[in-house]
Image: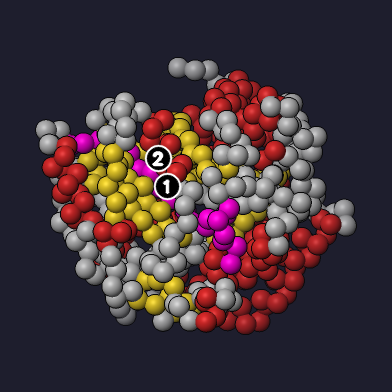
Amino acid sequence: MSRLSLLDSNFLMAENRETPMHVGGVHLYRYPKGVNKREFLSGLKEILLSGDDLRPPFNQRLSSNLLSRANLAFSWETDKDIDLEYHVRHSALPKPGRYRELFTLISRLHSTLLDRNRPLWEMHLIEGLANNQFATYLKIHHCAMDGIGAMHATQSMYSRSPEGRTDYSPLSRQSWEKYKRDLLPERAAASITRQDIRTLSERITAQIGSGVNLAGALLKYGNVWIGGGRPLNVPWHSVPHAKISSSVSGSRRFVAQTWPYSRIRAVGKALGGTLNDAVLAMCAGGLRRYLDQVGELPEKPLKAMVPVSLRVEGDLESANAVGFIVANLGTHLADPGERFETIQQSVQAGKKVYAGLSAGEAALFTQLTSSPIVLTTLLGLGELLPAYNLVISNVPGSRKAMYWNGALVEGVYPASIVLHGQALNITLVSYMDQLDFGIIACRRSLPHVQRLLDHLEESLQELEELAGITAD
């Protein structure tokens, strides 16, 4: 039995019917040439159901002890009687099998809570898509896995070659151990590397300077509240009340779109920034258009929580290893150049807070600064006191093509979490030469969120014009 960390437990304590705390991913595939589609999908389902030795967290459920039932402390225990027929599900889309029908299904699946009496995951195999495609949807509780962990979990299913074949479950220990061996080549047992020395140094330094470093980071946060620290942004400070900061129901709407990686990266480079700066500016421009169209654009700039991975190199086992910064999106500014500069400055200021912290210090700092968000959620104060307006997350994925028993993976679209006060979440994954955006929203608060896709494209075109980039 293993205890969940405070950060992992927060996702369980903040969960209720209106705020499910699972994350998901929709993967699109193209059938291999010449296969019988029904037989091919039946074979994949049999593989998914074949796992008799699943790896954590797929073989674990929450302990049923008193502390866990009281939502006070949580731990994992091995589930010795997993019903895989419950967790692995096969669905078919109604005709004509467009992405609209797929997104409607995902919206419904993402709205329902996971059963805490069972391992906290589901895998859906989805047929009936047009264009010679099928899909999967993996849904797993955030207490068990963060975005980076979910990417590793799904990538362990795949091969780099269209000729690769496996007959064992992608959720099994066998699959996971093979993935780790391929990703992290074994080092000689007796060798001492530079990373070993750095790790030892960090442990010694942590015993001496953790308090000083943490105090310094918290002081920077506190300085913002007394009028200093610009351009640093912190939760709750000058966060406007907007349509996307309303309370949420349990219903969700999921939409997705792909943009070329090179196109967005070129904008960031031309404007003297990074890919992530360009993504945030693209989202800021899209949100400004969307809210202005419905008459809900606030006078103050929207603030976005931007997750920052704290996962150390080689760590494939941590459930959640993530911090966050708050980015000023500059949505009150009509000029896209001013918005880009505002975003860039706020992101750099946020990164500087973490720059002086070790991985352990950064994790503790994140727990200290994020725990009040759980408290406001539990007390139902998220709409009244929003810590930020939305989440925008960029998760690195595989830059090479991936195949599942010969089926090419054509898209990787994440579906994340919304909360009271944050009714919209934009998460994207880099895959091959593309950026796959997955947008999840409360259907009641933002009933026409699909319009945001068009506004994102318009925003990108505006940035390209600013950067002097002409379309091919």
**Quadrant in which the N terminus appears:** bottom left
User: Where residue 195 is drawn, which disc sits there?
Assistant: none
Question: Percent x, y for residue 146?
Answer: 48, 59
Circle 1: is it few (<14), some (14-19), or many (20+) Cα within 10 Å? some
For the magenta stretch, what is the residue range? 13-32
The answer to which of 106 and 359 lies nearer the viewer is 106
Q: Which residue shows up at 55% across the image and 56% down it?
A: 17
Q: Is residue 184 above or below residue 347?
A: below
Q: Which residue shows up at 70% across the image and 38% down it?
A: 243
Which residue corresponds to mark 1?
Answer: 109
Question: Percent x, y for residue 379?
Answer: 71, 62
User: Where residue 105 is drawn, which disc sits there?
Assistant: 2
Q: Which residue shows up at 28% across the image and 39% down it?
A: 92
Question: Percent x, y for residue 72?
Answer: 59, 76
| Secondary structure state at the residue bearing disc 2 | helix
Looking at the image, residue 193 sits to the left or right of residue 286; the answer is left
Contact between labelled residues 1 and 2, with CB atoms less than 8 Å apart: yes
| Secondary structure state at the residue bearing disc 1 | helix
Q: Is residue 280 visible?
A: no
